[in-house]
Each structure stands twice: as structure tokens, then as C-alpha cells.
Image (cartoon, coloured by chain):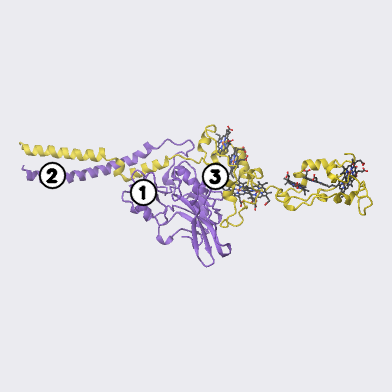
Amino acid sequence: MRIPEQVKRLAIVIGVLVALTLVARFVLIPRSLTSTSLHWSLTTQRESAKPVKFAGSTACQDCHDDIAAKKAKSFHRVLACEGCHAPSVKHAEDPSAAKPVIPRDRTTCARCHAYDPSRPTGFPQINLTTHNPLKSCSTCHNPHDPVPPKVPKECAACHAQIERTKAVSSHALLTCTTCHKAPERHKTAPRTALPSKPDSREFCATCHGQGRAGTPKEAPKVDIATHGARNLCWECHYPHLPEGRP
Amino acid sequence: MNKREFLKGAVVFIPAAGVLGAVARHAAGKETAAKEPAAKQPAAAPNAKNGYEPSAHYYGMGIDIDKCIGCNLCAVACKVENDVPDEPFYFRTWVERYTITRDGEVSVGNISLGTAREPMREPVQDAREVVRTFFVPKLCNQCQKPPCVQVCPVNATFTTQDGVVIIDAERCIGCRYCIQACPYGQRYLHPKTRVADKCTFCLHRLVKGLQPACVEVCPTQARIFGDLRSHASRLVRFRRLNKLHVLKPQLNTDPKVYYANLDGEVR
């Protein structure tokens, strides 16, 4: 049977149209636009491939095991290293390539410890303006193991030189507080609460005054009215090492 | 065949070709979707847990209001990790301060609005008048019935198998429907890319076995992250031990961010 010419041509035209549709459909339109599951998995992959910036605390442990071990037992055990040292994934991959920030300024600690009424009660907070101003917090608190520094009982903890000097002097048996009235706060905030110092010749006279009542027997006596009369006693005798022959 | 017949034929055949194509596409799509992901998996990061299987996880977050100290590290870390613009008003997560006064007035401030270094510390009202004051971290609730997903006209946003609502930045047309639709205000239009952006639970960290950045830096474990499918996860224990609330439960969005010790005033 002879196929009419028109039908042949029509078949060709339809064939071309179908071919065009298929090309458009499968070549021009990306598959992810037509397949939801493909689109979703591609998007998820793209999202998952984004770079990480915080290496995570476990990454630091490998090399800084001493600090990590110390911190793990401290009040700061839950804190992330990178919370203070800034994101450091580059440093963790190659320590010489990048250095983490070392936050010595007071604002780093203040972020968490400055007093704020909305903070849960019991969280340790300080008044930033009065708590040892101007000094970096890490001079007194170890950032990796912060404890309130133990309040020293002895004056010697901070005045070791004077204590050693006095210990070998004739004033060895006198306690510091015989001559200095030290407020308790001097031990926690030394500069804001200074102890008293003897301010007159009369003070030394209470033990060394000739012919006075109540002076200790073993203290050598001088005539206060005439002995070195124009000067304060400690301009000639160092009170922490008072030797008879200066 | 005359012109009339030709046109008639065409009217029948072209849609027929379309139907054929659609059938073919459906089959092809299914096939490639099944094969492609495995082939195109990005090279695993060195510390990646090998063989991350999305369907094995279902993520959620717990927030313990009693533990939040409002240090704002979470909001800062999130911006760094996810390239969220530095300017205030663009957030994937932030911290709110609630202050409830004696006359029942509730005021809410966003403390994350300051600069990265100095969070906003607006003075709290007359202390004698304040009954309660506390911080509330906010982030995408990763709803199980997300209204934002339903409204997207181009299918650019969806829930992954591990339960995270994400956006295809390449398909999003920036129409802002989803931003309007989110009852928690968790989406914003990224000023550079001009597409919607939101919290992803740091999906790129999860696949490598890391925690989301906000959880990583939280100093008090006020944020608890975990897998609802795993019985050993901290989140599951947190859910067992606390009386939980979700935000705006009446909207039936079924959030996966669970708050413990939440005050009734929090919206």
C-alpha cells in the first residue's frame, strides 16, 4: 500500500516535535527541577558541605591535653575553648597557620560574670567597676581553672620581704598588727583598703619611752624628749629591722 | 491532508507527547534520585563520622531557661558559623530578656541587638517593681508541621530526613511568603543573596558529628541538643526529666525545640 505523501510529511513534523519536547525536557531542564527527591538530596548535600568554623572542644583536646584536663575539672568545664579563643578550625588543622585569639581583656569575662539582674541567682557575678579594676582578670584567676583566689591568712603571703626582714630583727616577736591596723578587706582588695601606719614618735614611745608605765620590760628605753628629737623614729630606725646602732 | 486536518492532528499529538514525556520523566527522576546522592557525596571531612545516615536521626533541641545567663555567645557564634550578616536585625538565633513588673506588665528586649562584643544591656526598670526577669534564647523551632514550608511557591524549602527545615538558596526567589508565614519570626531575607535564610541546626556540623555552634559555645548547658531517635541522647533524658513547653502550642506547628522552666508569659 502506498502511504500518501502528506501523511509522511505529517509523521516527520510530529517526529521532530516529539524529539524537541524530549530534548527540552531531558536536556535543557535540569533534572533537579523536575525530581523533588533529587532536588532535596542535592540541596541537603550543598548545605552539608558548607565549611565548619568552630572546630569543637574535642578537637583542641588532642594537642592541648594539659589545659583540657585542667579545665575539665574546673568551674569552667562546660565552656568551649572557642567561646573564649574565637573559632579556630584553621589553627586546629595546622597550628602554625593561624593563632587563636588570646582574650586578656576584661570584657571577655564580663560577658558572663558582670552583674545582670536577669541572670539566674547563684551564678557568680561581680561588679566590674569595683572588682579589682584595671587589672586583667587572668592575673588573679586562671581562666582554665578559675577559683576565687584563696584569701591569704598571713600578711606574709604578700609582704614576704618585710616578714623575712622582721623575722631576724629585734622586732621578730611583734605581730604586724601591733603597728598596723589592717582592715579585713585589705587581704582581698589591697589597694582599695590600706592598713594604718604609725604616724608619730609617741607610737614607739608606748614601748620604748623611758620612765613610762606599761612598757615591755625587754624593750630598751630611750628618753623620748631628747633622743633624735627632731625626727620621726623611723627616719633613723627601719621599723622592720630596728637595730640599736643604725 | 489539508491544513485543517494537520492542525487537528497537532492538537492531539502535542499533548500526547507531553504526557509521554511526563511518564518518562517520572521514571527517570526516580531512578536518578536513587543513584545520584551516593555518587555525588562530598569527600568526607577528615573528622567526619563515616557513613552519615540522615534517616537514622531526628534532631531537636531543649532549652533550660533556668540555666541561661544571657551571655549572648550563642547568637555571636551562630553569626560567625553561618555567615549571617553582622548588622543587628539579622539573626538565626537570639536571646530575649523578659522583665515582668508588679503591675503585670511584660517587657521583652532582644539583648543580641548590640554589637558582637557588647551585647545590648539596656537598664532594667526600677528594681523594686520587677517581679521576675530572665533570658529566653530563641531559634527556629524546626516544626514538624512547618507553616513556612507550606507557603513556598517554588518548593525551595522542605524538611530533611533528619528533621531540619532548610532552604535551597538557588531555587528561592526571595518572595518572602515564608518570612510572613513563620509565627516565630525565624526567617529573614539575607541582604546579600536576597533569598530567605534561617537556622539549619548547623546541618553541615551535624553530618560531621559536631554539635550546632550555639550549643558548642553555651557555657551552662542551657541548650541541649540531641537526636530524638536515640535513646541515649542528652535530649531524650532532658525530655524525660523536665516538664516541657513549646512556643505557641495553639498554632499546632508541633515544634521540636522544647523549653524547660518556661514562664507562662513567654510568647
Residue occupying image coordinates x 22% and y 38%: A23
Amino acid type for the residue under numbered disc 1: Thr
Tint of chain B: purple
Report the Cα–Cα distance between label 3 and label 2: 68 Å
Which is more foreground, mark 1 or mark 3? 3
**Which residue reaches farthest top?**
A96
Helix, strand or loop at mark 3: helix
- Look at the image and tell me whether residue A145 can be seen: no
Q: Observer-nearest residue: B6 or A51? A: A51
Give yes or no for contact between labels 3 and 2 (Cβ–Cβ under 8 Å).
no
The residue under label 3 is: A83
Q: Chain of mark 3?
A: A
The residue under label 1 is: B157
Label 3: how many residues lie within 10 Å, few (<14), some (14-19) or many (20+)?
many
Helix, strand or loop at mark 2: helix
- Horizontal side of B179 relative to A220 (left or right) equals left
Quarter of the image with the N terminus of chain B is: top left
Is the residue at mark 3 from the same chain as the one at mark 2? no
Say which label, 1 or 2, has the lower sequence index.
2
